[in-house]
Amino acid sequence: MIFIQTEFYSRTLEMSTQLNVLLPQKHLGIGCEAPVSRKAGHPVLYLLHGGGDDHTHWMRFTSLERYVEQRDLAVIMPNVNLSRYTNMAYGLPYKDYVEKELPEAVHSFFHLSEKREETFIAGASMGATGALTIGLSKPENYAAIGVFSAGNWVAEKMYTEDIMPAETIAKRRHTNFLVYGMEDTSPLIGNPEYDAFAMAQKALDEGKPLPKIFHATGTEDHKYENTQITRRFFESLPGNPFRYEYHECPGTHCWKVFDHWIQKFLDQIEIKE
């Protein structure tokens, strides 16, 4: 694989931002490799980081490069800081950046497929929420969404001190305020700008192409009960229009679990030669 670490100027963010990229490569002999030639461009996965992480973590804490090297798959890993992939109330418009400018930019930089059926988005924790909201706000752009160890953020119940320390809860409330302009996100339920369930219903109502949703978590994850809210919503939709799948494995909210599920998600997506 070709591994690229780059910075470029984002018009949306009005500043330079970071991006890590994996591109397919073929082996020609000992110490000799060359880019893979693909007429239509490489299938592409937008892989999103979690809160407190950055664009380097998928490469640092998993064997992602090994997982994708035989799949002719490009991977785009942007940095969005602690934005929850939204247009922040007190911050920068990261949703517009990831949803609109980023795909335009990487397609101009690299040889990527323009086909919806070869475009995927996934993430863990905050990145899972980002993959779900970005993927459902532009369902016509993605064939599949991978949601690992999280769900619809605005529908989640605020944690109590029997689940996490008071200091952590206070920090989450502060982040909610910076991102959404409010500590309690329940007023945003039903708002298609932030609520993934409202986005899904809008996509259904408008008859848009619907991506497949692969949802997974660890059974000891502190987000487990909140992920069940998302599970119940998609399993309640008649006919399973998003071909929604839910999976569990033993584990907490950790990279061991994220590493497990990214492999399973890659096994699920369909990449045609």
Image: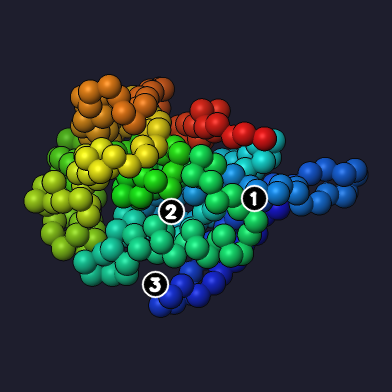
- The answer to the question of whether label 1 and label 3 lie on touching residues, with beta carbons closer than 8 A, is no
Residue 72 appearing in the image: yes
- For marks 2 and 3, the one nearer the N-term is 3
Q: Position of residue 7 (x, y in %)?
A: 56, 70
Q: Quadrant of residue 6?
A: bottom right
Question: Which residue, given by chain and number where applicable, does mark 1 sit on?
Answer: 41
Few, some or many residues within 10 Å of mark 3 (<14, 14–19, 20+): some
**141 and 223: which one is in front?**
141
- Foreground label between 1 and 3: 1
Residue underneath mark 2: 53
* Circle nearer the N terminus (2, 1): 1
> Mark 3 belongs to which amino acid?
Thr
Q: Residues within 10 Å of mark 2 (few under 14, many from 20)?
A: some
* Residue 165 seen in the figure: no
| Of pointers 1 and 3, the one earlier in the residue sequence | 3
Q: Nearer the viewer, residue 216 or 118?
A: 118
Q: Residue at x 22, y 27 (%)?
A: 237
- Residue 136 lies, with reference to residue 230, above or below; the image says below
- The image's colour scheme reads rainbow
What secondary structure is marked by label 3? loop
Kind of residue at badge 2: Asp
Dot 2 falls on a residue whose secondary structure is loop
Disc 2 to disc 1, C-alpha distance: 29 Å
At x 35% / y 27%, what residue is drawn?
Answer: 244
The residue under label 3 is 12
Residue with the most extreme right position: 30
- Which residue is rendered at x = 13% and y = 46% of the image? 190
Front residue of 123 and 99: 99
